[in-house]
Amino acid sequence: MILPFPSRYPADETERRIPDVAAARTLAGAAAAPIEALLARRRAEWTALLEPGDATLLAHTEDAVRLGHARLAVRHGNLGSDFHAYHNEGHVLEICGSRIDRLRDTLGLRALALRDWCALMLFGACHDLRQREAPQLVDGIGANERASIDEAQRILDACGFSREHDADLHAALELMIAGSTFDARPVPGGYHYNAADLVQSGGALASRLDQVLDRRSPGWRQDPLLVAAQRLALVAADLDTANVAEPFTRFASTAENLCREREMLSGRSLAAGESALPVLGFLTDGQDRFFFELHRFQSDAGVAAFGPGKEANAPKLKALCMGVRARIAVQGAPQTGNQVIEAYRATLADLTV
C-alpha cells in the first residue's frame, strides 16, 4: 500500500458472502444484465487497443467490475436491504458507461492506454464499495474510502491480478479511491455528517492528493508509477463528479437521489416535518453552492470532456433553484420533505417542457 493508514478494514458479511466472481454471477443472476452488456460493449470497443497478453488483462478487469458491481448491489442496491438512493450499483453503470463514453469521445480511444481505461473501469466499480464506516478522516481520506481501498485490493487479488506485475493498477486504484474523498467542511445549516452531505460539501481530495503523498510517501514524484497513478486520480475524480455535466434532467435526478440518501442517513423521514427545511436547503442553496462555488474539474481531460456540459447546465440550475424557492413561497412553508421534492419535480418539469 502506498498510503500507510493506521488501521485496515477486514472483509464484512457481504464480502464473505460474495468472495469471487463465480459467487457474484450466481447471486446477481438476471440483475447482472446491464453490467454484462456494458462489459461486452467495452470488449468490442477496446479490441483495437489489444496487444499480446492483453486478453488476460481485459478478462481480469471484467471479473473485478462484475464482483464490485454485485457487492454494491447487495450492500446498498437493488439486491439488498440497505438501499442507498445514490450510492448503489447504478452509480457503477454511470461511471463505467456514459461518463467513460464521453471521455473516450472527447479524447479519442487511443488517448489513453488500455491499462488506463481498465483502471478507470476498476475505479467506477470499486470506489464506493463501503458506505457505512464510522466517520474518521486520515489526511483528509475518509473511512468509507479507506475501507473501499482495502476491499478493492482484495478484489484485484480474487480476480487474478498480481501485486507485483500489476502494481500500476493496484497503485492507481488506491490513489483514485483516496482522491475521491470529498472535503468534509460542514454544509451551512449545521446538518449531520453523512456521505451524501460530503458529496455536496466541497471538492474532491484529488486536487490535494499530491500534498498527502508528499507527507506520506516522500520521493513519490521520482516514481513514474506513482506519478501516473496520481494523474489518473485527477481524471477519476472528474468522472465521479461529472453528474454536473449530465443532461439537465438527469443531473437534477441525481440531486434528488443524493437528497433522499442524505435524509435516510440522517434518520429523517421524508414524510415528516423534520425533513422539510433540510430538503429545501439541500435542493436549493446546497445545489447552488456546490455547483458554482465548490465544484471544479481537476484534470485537463475532465475539463474537455465535461466542462461544456456543466456550462450548459449553469443557467438551468439557477432557474431551477429560483423556481423551487418561488413555488414554495407561493405555497407557504413546506410541511414535509416529500412536499419539497414534489415542488422540485414540478419546477423541473416546467423548465424542461
Image (cartoon, rainbow, N blue to C red):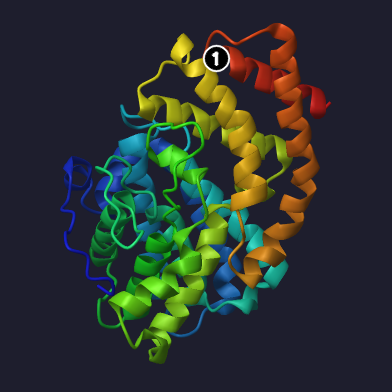
What's the residue at 35%, 36% (across, down)? 76
Packing grade of label 1 (10 A; few <14, some 14-19, many >=20) is: many
Q: Disc 1 residue type? A: Asn
Q: Position of residue 221 (x, y in %)?
A: 41, 87
Question: Viewed as shown, does residue 123 lie left or right of 37?
Answer: left
| Image quarter of residue 112 | bottom right
Question: What residue is shown with label 1?
Answer: 338
Which residue appears at 44% of the width and 82% of the height? 227
Image quadrant holding the C terminus, namely top right
Residue 129: x and y, percent?
34, 48
Disc 1, SS:
helix
- Quick check: can you spot residue 321? yes
- Residue at 31% over, 79% down: 167
Report whether 97 appears left or right of 319: left
- Residue located at (67% from left, 17% from top): 343
Residue 34 in percent (x, y) is at 50, 43
Question: On screen, 263 above or below 89?
Answer: above
Question: Left or right of 286: which side holds 323?
Answer: right
